[in-house]
Image (cartoon, coloured by chain):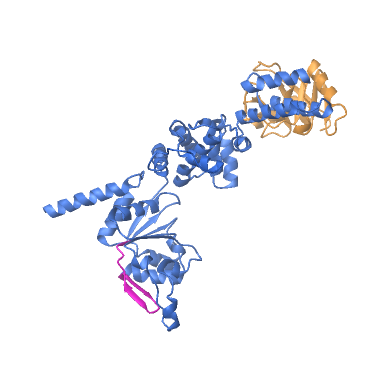
Chain colours: A orange, B blue
Amino acid sequence: VTVLHWAAPARPLTATAAAGSGSVGAALAHRATGRVGLLVHRAGDWIVVVGESEHLPWADGVTYLGELPGTNRVLVPVHRVPTAPPDVVHAAVRRAAGGVGGTIALLPATASSDGEGVLVVLPGR
Amino acid sequence: MSEDLVGLATSVRALIDTASRGLVGRRSLVELVVLGAVAREHVLVIGPPGTAKSQAVRQVAEAVGDRYFEYLIGRFTEPNELFGPIDLVELRQGRVVVDTRDMLPEAEIAFLDEVFLGSSAILNTLLGILNERVFRRGHTVRQCPLRICVGASNELPTDLDLAAFADRFLIRVFVEPMPDPHLDELLEVGWQASRPLLPVTGERKGGVLEVAAADVDRVDVAAVRPAIAQCIRTLRRHDITLSDRRAVRAQRLVAAAAVLDGRTTATDADLWALLPAVPTHLAQQRATDVLGPLLERSRSGVAGTAAEEASRGLLATAERIVRTHVEYLGLPVGEDRMLRMEGLAREIDATFPPGALPVAIVAVRAALVDEL
């Protein structure tokens, strides 16, 4: 997915998921193991743990995600949101994900990128 | 114009100057009250609460030296609250005589707030006072020295009976909250008027709250006043109303917040104290959102939780996290401590953008990374 611009929201979104790739993802999965109320999803190199804010695991380098206001279950980083209108983002993400109806995480490809977004589709939700 | 009249006009102008002192944007109201007093015609002031209506009339009465009566009428106000109690000694003789000492029938200038809320008994008696300057109740009939009665209400009545009563007020003055360009002046003048005439000096006596309350009068709010005005303007732009009176008095909350944080100079760290002055729950919630960027530097050493809740300010959150970390460091090593420390790390990373950690949080986070 190509996201034109990302920007800091006026306030951080409420975290409903924790995401990480590589060793960060592995650490998140490890910490989430055995904890009640958390769902761990793997998609490629990414691990996304979904649950209540106060139960989410932490690992150094984690990206916390929250639902982008104005969308239905499109998660974006709590500190970086697409600047495009939410309905446009919602439609583009759904289309790019092949029309699936579950929760979809949209992450910046890199910490500094202002163009590419990585889609992580969370099955079964 | 004769010399006498020239001198008289000069005196009246001086009187208006005196009565207008300390009032921002209310000179025309003072002038119209004086006009009414000279013409012996009553004034009806229509406008929202907290717009210095009663203050203006009170200052006219003080400047003139007239006997003044003021009352906020409610639906349950009884006639004796305005006109005086029934004389019980006379009542035993079968006579209904009203003791009017220091009450409306003996006033020269009267201010009746929410005047249309009065009962029919009150309004009927008032009619006689307004029209004929005669007070009649029971066996009491007396001439009233009333020069002018100023009634106030939020809006003109639509009820026909009340409209007929309202017609007795020949002069209509419509006041509005202070417009944005005058806010800074309103705040400054209002703050000065709320402080003791003499500088607060000498030994600080009394209990801790008494001393702290006295310290509020020593606080310098000048530096943060433009930010306060900016907050109020921002609220207004979002249709969140803070009356002029609340805006002025909210400065005392800001000053008190500075005192509770151990300072005698208010700064933008104290702006969180404006939030509790917003009058409704819904408006407070909206105000928290719209004032967010202006309240970001809010913090308080003593009232930290209130500061954080009011402002959701990042600095206030940072201070709480630092305190909590110190507290957790005292816990024995084990799973409970680990989970609590993880919770702090989670809060830090979910609250502060990477690369924008407050200075106080950097060391806490580094310690958490080491421990976890």
**Residue A118 % position (x, y):** 73, 20
Q: Which residues are magenta?
A: B132-149
Q: Quadrant of residue B37?
A: bottom left
> Position of A8 compared to B82: left or right?
right
Q: Where is the C terminus of chain B found, in terms of image quarters?
A: top right
Whether residue A10 appears in this view of the structure is no
> Position of A37 compared to B63: left or right?
right
Q: Quadrant of residue A52?
A: top right
> Position of A48 compared to B281: left or right?
right
Residue found at x 32% / y 51%: B30
Look at the image and say whether residue B241 sits in the magenta stretch: no
Q: Nearer the viewer, residue A118 or B154?
A: B154
**Residue B146 % position (x, y):** 31, 65
Look at the image and say whether residue B143 sits in the magenta stretch: yes
Does B355 appear above or below A73? Answer: above
Whether residue B199 appears in this view of the structure is yes
Residue found at x 83% / y 23%: A29
Q: Quadrant of residue B106?
A: bottom left
Residue found at x 48% / y 45%: B246
**Residue B82 % position (x, y):** 42, 66
Q: Nearer the viewer, residue A122 or B284?
A: B284
Residue found at x 56% / y 33%: B261
